[in-house]
Structures are given as C-alpha cells and as structure tokens.
Image (cartoon, grey):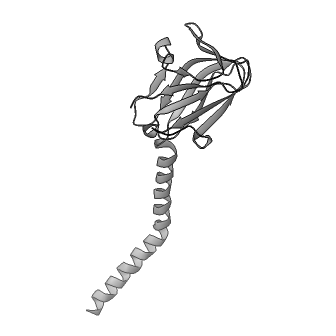
Amino acid sequence: MSNNKETAQRILQTCLQIWHKAGAVIILSLLTIFIYNALFLNRAHIELDCTSDHTATIEVYWTEPGKDFSKDKMSRVQIQPNETRTGLFLHDIREISRIRFDPTNQVDGMIIFRKITISQPGMRPIVLETPEDFAQFEEGTDIAAVSFVPELGWIVHSAGKNPYLYLTLPP
C-alpha cells in the first residue's frame, strides 16, 4: 500500500515539475493567441492606392448603426506627394455601418484614389476602383469637385479645411 502511495506522490511531483516548466509557456501561448485575435483578426484594414499633390493626412472615422462619428473611432495616415500605397486599421467591420473619409487637410488640395480595399480576415473584401464603386460615396462638406478619370482614378478636390465623404457599408 505504501508503494502505491509513494508512486502517486512521485507522479504528482513529476506533474508539478512539468507544470512549473511548461505552465508559463502554455499561459504565454494562450495570451499571444488572444492578443493576435484581438489586434488582427477582429480588425478591418483599409489599403489605399492613391497619390496627392501635397503632403496629406487622411483620416478615416467609423461608426456603428445609430451612432455619431467621434475622434475615439478614428485612424489616420499621412501620405507624401507621389506616394502610392498606404494603409490603416479600423475596428471590427461587422460592427461598422458607415465610414467617413477625410481625404486631405489642405484647403485647396487634390488626392487621387486608384483603389480602396477594405478587408478583414474571414470576410469578403470591399473593393472600390470603378466609377460605380466610387459613386457609392456621399459628399460631405468642403468638397470642391469629385470626378473619375479612367487613366488616373477617383479625383477629389477639397474646398476647405475639413473635406469629407461618407460610405455606407452593406449589411
């Protein structure tokens, strides 16, 4: 009987030693999976293929159904003249109903979008690159002109310090 008790104690000690060595690795692995999921899998990414005639700050706001836009739900990226590709992250696209694009912070600026791709793992990407695609945007304030030139793309001219456009996402 004491032999079984000693065997059980040795097994318990071995298990505890393994746990002490591997427990931290297991916990760290689970934490890494959780952080990766929270930061990358449940976030949308907007890829912008664009050019500007000036250094521009592009701001993108998002909102859930029935809510207003706010600085708490905003992402921004700065582009340099003739830069072509850049991107930024948003919240989980499944919770977003509208996106507001502030394409430039210049009073008399111009930016050309050749393609805008909104994607998130596990979801079909939203690709905007044709005149019909860009026609989904609604003009806000301080937009002087919007046009589509096939060889260039979607051209947005600002007329004030706070130009913006809205895009309503499909449900």
In which image quadrant can residue 140 be found?
Answer: top right
- Vertical order, 130 against 75 (above or below): above
| Left or right of 40 in this view: 4 | left
| The residue positioned farthest toward the bottom in the image shown | 2
Which sits in the foreground, 32 or 25? Answer: 32
For the C terminus, the quadrant is top left
| Left or right of 161 in this view: 73 | left
Q: Residue at x 62, y 41 (%)?
A: 71
Which sits in the foreground, 128 or 100? Answer: 100
Image coordinates of residue 160 in percent, x first then y, are 71, 22
For the N terminus, the quadrant is bottom left
In which image quadrant can residue 58 be found?
Answer: top right
| The residue positioned farthest toward the left in the image shown | 1
Q: Residue at x 50, y 36 (%)?
A: 44
Q: How many marks?
A: 0
Which sits in the foreground, 87 or 32? Answer: 87
- Vertical order, 59 against 147 (above or below): below
| Left or right of 157 in this view: 117 | left
Which sits in the foreground, 78 or 107? Answer: 107
Image coordinates of residue 117 in percent, x first then y, are 51, 26
In which image quadrant can residue 19 be found?
Answer: bottom left
Image coordinates of residue 121 in percent, x first then y, are 43, 37
Q: Residue at x 52, y 46 (%)?
A: 39
Q: Residue at x 46, y 67 (%)?
A: 23
